[in-house]
């Protein structure tokens, strides 16, 4: 530690977070790099907010998909669609793996994969519905 007038205390090294030769800071005094640290924290918070938003959109899209599938049940009983159960299984597995993660790069990767998988499921459902005659939609 360094006391006033630049004298070093005998046998003491710098405290954690202080550099040798620096004057100790009072509790209310801003620390060097404090602004950078708050920016970093804010960036992490923004990143977490973005991940939360993406997760919310994924959940919302999944809920809409389930709702649409329920609406299509009467139509599917009369005219079966080509199903892609492997995509649904993959989506379930990704979501299960994601549930075990809290954050980090693997969570972000799983979230992106879940989004892509759900997008593919919806695209395949839409392309399968195109083959139905328009009067079939009246039932739904």
Image: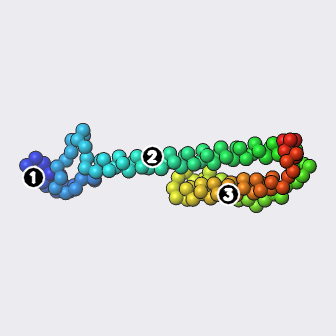
Residue visible at 84% across and 55% down?
131
| Mark 3: few/some/many CA within 10 Å (<14, 14-19, 20+) | some
Marks 3/1: CA–CA distance: 64 Å
Q: Residue 27, position in %: x, y?
A: 24, 40
Q: Which mark is residue 117?
A: 3
**Does any portion of residue 49 appear in the rendered image?**
yes
N-terminal label among 3 and 2: 2
**Does any portion of residue 94 appear in the rendered image?**
no
Q: Residue 30, position in %: x, y?
A: 25, 43
Task: Specify the color scheme.
Answer: rainbow
Marks 2/1: CA–CA distance: 41 Å
* Secondary structure beneath label 1: loop
Lateral position of residue 140 relative to residue 94, left or right? right
Lateral position of residue 110 relative to residue 28, left or right? right
Residue visible at 70% across and 58% down?
120
User: Disc 2 marks which residue?
Assistant: 45
Residue visible at 57% across and 48% down?
54
User: Disc 1 marks which residue?
Assistant: 7
């Amino acid at each position: 530690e360094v006391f006033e007038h630049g004298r070093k205390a005998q046998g003491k090294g710098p405290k954690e977070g202080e550099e040798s030769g620096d004057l100790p800071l009072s509790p209310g005094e801003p620390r060097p790099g404090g602004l950078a640290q708050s920016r970093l924290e804010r960036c992490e918070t923004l990143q977490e907010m973005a991940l939360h938003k993406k997760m919310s959109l994924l959940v919302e899209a999944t809920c809409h998909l389930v709702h649409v599938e329920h609406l299509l049940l009467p139509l599917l009983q009369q005219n079966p669609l080509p199903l892609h159960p492997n995509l649904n299984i993959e989506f379930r597995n990704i979501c299960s793996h994601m549930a075990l993660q809290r954050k980090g790069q693997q969570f972000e990767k799983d979230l992106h994969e879940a989004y892509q998988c759900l997008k593919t499921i919806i695209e395949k459902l839409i392309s399968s519905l195109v083959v139905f005659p328009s009067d079939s939609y009246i039932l739904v």
